[in-house]
């Protein structure tokens, strides 16, 4: 079932410039959506010019999801599809040099991350919810009545939605210990796959590394139901953790600034660039 | 509360869907689990719940316990019965197999389910479950109710995963990409690992359903048979070695034809 394509959010768009629509920034991580974090990091990796646009908590893609992009007057949804489009439009392909076995490994491990590990995120968040409306979450964006509305109405609704999704997918039927064990096994598989390499396929990061980054950083920086998973990553998966932190250092020098200022306008390149980008997006 | 009260020690009772005419079990997870039981040479009796179960299928009862979720079941039975089919696998292979399992169970099959959702009526035809739903007015009512129930279940499951929002060609391409990856991993071999292991049962359970339960235009069945012949051969070999009673169980509807075969 397709929803009609929404009208463009950015009417005065620049040619060959990506407008990335996502949730506003949070206090403990630039974005709580592993797919948005993956996509924005991918744009930075491939040096594709982009500007963030806030979805103001309400606007979703034609497929009802975040993130989505607008490019040259067209709307594109679903982060995996978007990456395919961008590879084609901007002639960038981080995995161009992979052999057939490595390409197959990329497909399989991508499923392990986006369809396996991913589900531990809403599962945990539906059990530890208070932080979303607090300092670590979105509270900096709201004041007064709006803050109360957000905390008492929007967040509980979102949590109820998440619980229902987890139950429908199947993970909701397991208890916390079972989910933690399953997720730890999946983390161990990634740790085993990366081995002693810098990235999954050698010395150069590919889309798979960026996909892992988007998901693993959620466990390292956002509150889960317990510290089990974060501890497991840091203690039992050192190579995987080192890799995602290496990506953070290289592609997110503005991580702290983006979170403390709750700004979608910070860039890799420094404060002057950020000011110019902010001026441009108005 | 156990369904099988008079259970035998160390015997597994598998609760699942009834037989279909073209394939012993049209549910990939059930076919995978039953294939695994045969591969592990564990004594089992298959019982049809006749669509009356509250628990999602398949589930097992063994030594007074009820266990659900095919992957949890496989792990539990491996421990309880000391199954060694995966014990010589390297860590690297175990990790790869976990990724392949995610690809098959969480990407290929849900996308396939989204693809065939418009044809959910197939499930109540004579070829599938229709013959088990009764005759006359009761049969007609049960078929209508079953169709509605399955449509709701499948629609909800694929909506959660977002695969229902792709176009038909996007869905087919996604499945083909997954099948390509499987063929690369198989690499013209007879199994996914040096010796038969759990991943063989997983891939067989899901891909056999893809081939034998027809998609509207047969595009995917053709893709496997023609473009990925090694994958097609793998399915046929698994079928011959672990399901020599395939024809008999499909045509008679008898759930336990394996009891008089040596598998």
Image (cartoon, helix red, strand yellow):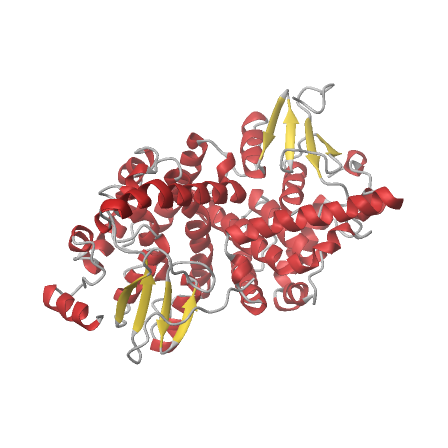
**Residue shown at the point (54%, 28%) measured from the top left:** B79
Quadrant location of residue A119? top left
> Is residue B152 depicted above or below A84 in this figure?
above
Task: Say above or below: A162 vs B1.
Answer: below
Query: Viewer-proximal residue, A245 or B125?
Result: B125
Q: In the image, residue B28 lies at what x, y percent?
A: 64, 47
Q: Nearer the viewer, residue A98 or B145?
A: B145
Total labels drawn: 0
Tell me the quarter of the image containing the C terminus of chain B: top right
x 40%, y 67%: residue: A82
Q: Position of residue B186 (x, y in %)?
A: 55, 56
Image quadrant where residue B255 sits: top right
Q: Residue at x 68, y 38 (%)?
A: B38
Seen at 60% across and 52% down, the residue is B155
Residue closest to the eye, A93 or B242 = A93
Residue found at the far right of this picture:
B136
Q: Is residue B217 left or right of residue A191?
A: right
Residue B47 at what x, y percent from top left?
74, 33
User: Closest to the observer: A153 or B153?
Assistant: A153
Percent position (x, y) of residue B257? 80, 38
Q: Is residue A164 visible?
A: yes
Q: Quadrant of the N terminus of chain B?
A: top right
Q: Residue furthest bottom?
A: A15
Left/right of residue B42 with respect to residue B89 in the rendered view: right
Q: Is residue B24 visible?
A: no
Extreme residue toward the front, this view = A145
């Amino acid at each position: 079932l397709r929803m009609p394509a929404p009208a463009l959010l950015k009417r005065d768009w620049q040619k060959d410039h990506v407008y990335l629509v996502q949730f506003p920034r949070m206090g403990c991580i630039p974005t709580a959506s592993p797919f948005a974090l993956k996509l924005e990091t991918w744009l930075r990796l491939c040096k594709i010019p982009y500007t963030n646009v806030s979805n103001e908590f309400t606007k979703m893609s034609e497929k009802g999801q975040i993130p989505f992009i607008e490019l040259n007057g067209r709307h594109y949804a679903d982060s995996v599809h978007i990456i395919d489009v961008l590879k084609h439009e901007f002639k960038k392909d981080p995995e161009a040099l992979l052999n057939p076995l490595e390409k197959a490994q990329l497909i399989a491990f991508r499923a392990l991350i986006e369809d396996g590990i991913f589900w531990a995120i809403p599962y945990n968040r539906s059990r530890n919810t208070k932080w979303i409306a607090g300092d670590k979450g979105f509270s900096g964006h709201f004041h007064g009545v709006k803050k109360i509305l957000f905390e008492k109405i929007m967040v509980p609704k979102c949590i109820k939605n998440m619980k229902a999704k987890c139950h429908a997918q199947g993970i909701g039927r397991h208890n916390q210990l079972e989910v933690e064990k399953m997720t730890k096994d999946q983390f161990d598989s990634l740790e085993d796959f990366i081995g002693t390499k810098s990235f999954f396929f050698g010395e150069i990061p590919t889309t798979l590394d960026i996909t892992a980054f988007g998901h693993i950083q959620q466990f390292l920086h956002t509150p889960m139901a317990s510290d089990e998973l974060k501890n497991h990553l840091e203690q039992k998966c050192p190579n995987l953790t080192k890799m995602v932190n290496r990506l953070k250092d290289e592609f997110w020098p503005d991580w702290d600034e983006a979170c403390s200022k709750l700004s979608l306008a910070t860039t890799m390149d420094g404060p002057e660039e950020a000011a110019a980008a902010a001026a441009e997006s108005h | 509360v156990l369904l099988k009260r008079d259970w035998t020690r160390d015997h597994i009772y598998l609760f699942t869907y009834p037989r279909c005419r073209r394939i012993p079990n049209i549910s990939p997870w059930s076919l995978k689990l039953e294939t695994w039981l045969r591969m592990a040479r564990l004594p089992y009796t298959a019982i049809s719940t006749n669509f009356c179960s509250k628990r999602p299928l398949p589930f097992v009862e063994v030594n007074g316990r009820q266990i659900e979720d095919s992957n949890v079941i496989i792990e539990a039975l491996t421990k309880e019965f000391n199954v060694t089919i995966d014990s010589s696998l390297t860590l690297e292979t175990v990790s790869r197999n976990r990724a392949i399992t995610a690809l098959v169970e969480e990407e290929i099959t849900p996308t396939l389910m989204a693809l065939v959702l418009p044809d959910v009526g197939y499930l109540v035809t004579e070829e599938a479950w229709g013959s088990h739903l009764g005759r006359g007015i009761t049969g007609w009512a049960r078929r209508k109710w079953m169709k509605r129930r399955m449509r709701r279940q499948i629609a909800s499951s694929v909506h959660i995963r977002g695969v229902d929002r792709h176009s038909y060609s996007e869905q087919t391409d996604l499945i083909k990409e997954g099948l390509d990856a499987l063929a690369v991993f198989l690499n013209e071999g007879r199994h996914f690992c040096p010796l038969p292991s759990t991943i063989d049962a997983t891939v067989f359970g899901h891909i056999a359903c893809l081939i034998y339960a027809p998609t509207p235009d047969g595009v995917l069945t053709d893709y496997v048979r023609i473009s990925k012949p090694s994958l097609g051969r793998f399915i046929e070999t698994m079928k011959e070695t672990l399901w020599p009673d395939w024809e008999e169980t499909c045509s008679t509807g008898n759930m336990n034809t394996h009891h008089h075969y040596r598998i």
